[in-house]
């Protein structure tokens, strides 16, 4: 849905949207498992667009360490401000204060709600993409998921040439 400032000039806009998986492209690393539902209000404050509402969905990411898919339910509230792009001069851009990083910008005469929702989902996901903080990962030697079972591999690295010799001897 496109949020048009000319519409907001007349009245605040209440919205309720359900976006099926596939509507928003989250990239190959993130799979949307459930429809994304959002309800909220868009209003114009001077030239700023104020967006507030709730967002609910569930996505799946692959753990960086153990490669297992991890389901991540998302249930958040958002409260966002968007300024017109032309309102910032180049010098100002360099000096954006940390507290102002919450403020986004819109180009032209409005903004695409899908883009806002996508950004909010991505911001919810942790920087470190692991299924859990203490994920033990895969054994580099046998590939065993060490969260599920302990393998008998020694922790020191086997010299690649010696490993080749080992398999040669077995034949
Ligand atoms: Zn993991
Ligand atoms: Zn192992």
Image (spheres, rainbow, N blue to C red):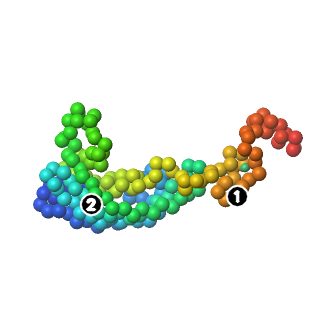
Q: Position of residue 29 (x, y in %)?
A: 49, 51
Q: In which quarter of the image is the C terminus?
A: top right
Considering only vertical position in the picture, is 139 above or below 32?
above
Q: Going by the image, does 42 lie left or right of 124?
A: left
In this view of the protein, can residue 93 be seen by the observer?
Answer: yes
Q: How far apart are marks 1 and 2 (CA)?
A: 45 Å
Mark number displayed over residue 149: 1
Mark 1, ligand 2, within 8 Å: the answer is: no
In the image, what residue occupies the spot 23% across and 63% down?
Answer: 41
In the image, what residue occupies the spot 34% across and 56% down?
Answer: 117
Q: Quadrant of the N terminus?
A: bottom left
Q: Going by the image, does 157 lie left or right of 43?
A: right
In this view of the protein, can residue 19 be seen by the observer?
Answer: no
In the image, what residue occupies the spot 20% across and 39% down?
Answer: 88
Q: Residues within 10 Å of mark 1 (few under 14, many from 20)?
A: few
Q: Going by the image, does 122 lie left or right of 60?
A: left
Q: Where is residue 78 in the image (x, y as percent from the top left)?
A: 31, 59
Among numbered discs 1 and 2, the one appearing first in the sequence: 2
Mark number displayed over residue 20: none
Q: Where is residue 164 in the image (x, y as percent from the top left)?
A: 80, 38
Camera-nearest residue between 150 and 59: 150
Mark number displayed over residue 52: 2
Q: Position of residue 153 (x, y in %)?
A: 75, 48
């Amino acid at each position: 849905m496109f949020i048009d400032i000319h519409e907001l000039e007349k009245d605040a806009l209440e919205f309720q949207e359900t976006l099926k998986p596939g509507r928003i492209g989250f990239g190959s690393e993130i799979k949307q498992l459930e429809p994304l539902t959002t309800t909220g209000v868009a209003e114009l404050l001077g030239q700023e667009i104020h967006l507030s509402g709730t967002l609910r969905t569930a996505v799946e990411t692959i753990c960086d360490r153990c490669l297992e898919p991890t389901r991540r339910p998302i249930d958040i509230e958002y409260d966002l401000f968007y300024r017109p792009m032309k309102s910032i001069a180049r010098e100002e851009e360099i000096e954006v204060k940390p507290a102002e990083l919450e403020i986004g910008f819109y180009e032209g005469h409005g903004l695409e709600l899908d883009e806002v929702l996508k950004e909010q989902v991505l911001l919810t996901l942790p920087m470190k993409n692991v299924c859990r903080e203490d994920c033990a990962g895969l054994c580099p030697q046998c590939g065993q998921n060490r969260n599920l079972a302990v393998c008998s591999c020694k922790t020191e690295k086997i010299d690649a040439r010696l490993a080749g010799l080992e398999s040669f001897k077995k034949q």
